[in-house]
Image: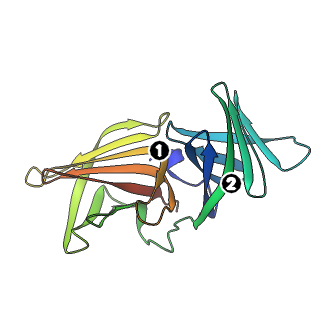
Amino acid sequence: MPSVFFTGGAEQLVSWRCTPAQDLISSHDGELRLWSTHGAYQLESAVVASGARYVKDDLSFWNKGDEAQVESENGRLDCQKDMTRQALTREDRPGVMFHGRGNEPGWVVNLAHDAPVLTLLLDYGNRELTLPYRVVAMDNQQGRVVLESGRADQPFRLSLEARACFDSMSGAPYPVRVTLDIDEQRYQGCGQGIAP
């Protein structure tokens, strides 16, 4: 799994509402991980007179309290802290290296940490499938993974992409957008890698 699917040891994910209109997610554990609609970035700590500042190439993130500014060659965003969510841990999800979920209808996917097997809960948990998978595409640099079924009798395609994602009901922040295609239906939601 690409490292940008994980919080980097941070205990929390923070969502930021920014103007011009864009929403960001960050986690902090020595370095700053930042997710936007365009991708995922890892920034290093930099010297600043007040607050905290992180940089990588032309991208900088500065925050103090509930306010932040993000600058890049594309311009500047002024941001306000919106929501904080505890990052998922192996204690929360034993044996799971990736957890994804979505709404309407409610569904869940968990990837086992010790074998290429996933468990799907579909239709609000009324249908459970445990299936082998194979990796058909992986781009660590861009933070993308595509998995397909290892069984011909139950095809599926699971696409994971490191992008800012917000739960459609609660607004809770996640670092990965999840798309599941199974039984001629498409499910969309959010997820997070879970470090050992």
Q: Residue at x 71, y 47 (%)?
A: 31
Q: Amino acid at mark 2?
A: His
Q: Are marks 1 and 2 in contact (CB under 8 Å)?
A: no
Query: Which of the 4 image quarters holds residue 128?
Result: bottom left
Name the spot of residue 173 as percent of width and height, x first. Answer: 52, 58
Q: Is residue 182 above or below residue 145?
A: below
Name the spot of residue 54 as percent of width and height, x first. Answer: 75, 41
Name the spot of residue 196 as percent of width and height, x first. Answer: 52, 62
Q: Is residue 84 above or below residue 140?
A: below
Query: Viewed as shown, does residue 140 lie left or right of 79?
Result: left
Q: CA distance from mark 1 to mark 2?
A: 16 Å
Query: Viewed as shown, does residue 12 lie left or right of 100?
Result: right
Give me the disc on residue 28: 2
Query: Which of the 4 image quarters holds residue 111?
Result: bottom left
Q: Which class describes the residues within 10 Å of circle 1: few (<14), some (14-19), or many (20+)?
A: many
Q: Residue at x 36, y 55 (%)?
A: 189
Q: Which residue is mark 1?
A: 162
SS class, disc 2:
strand
Q: Nearer the viewer, residue 158 or 22?
A: 22
Q: Which class describes the residues within 10 Å of circle 2: few (<14), some (14-19), or many (20+)?
A: some
Q: Which residue occupies the extreme left position in the image?
A: 153
Q: Amino acid at mark 1?
A: Ala
Q: Is residue 160 above or below residue 190?
A: above
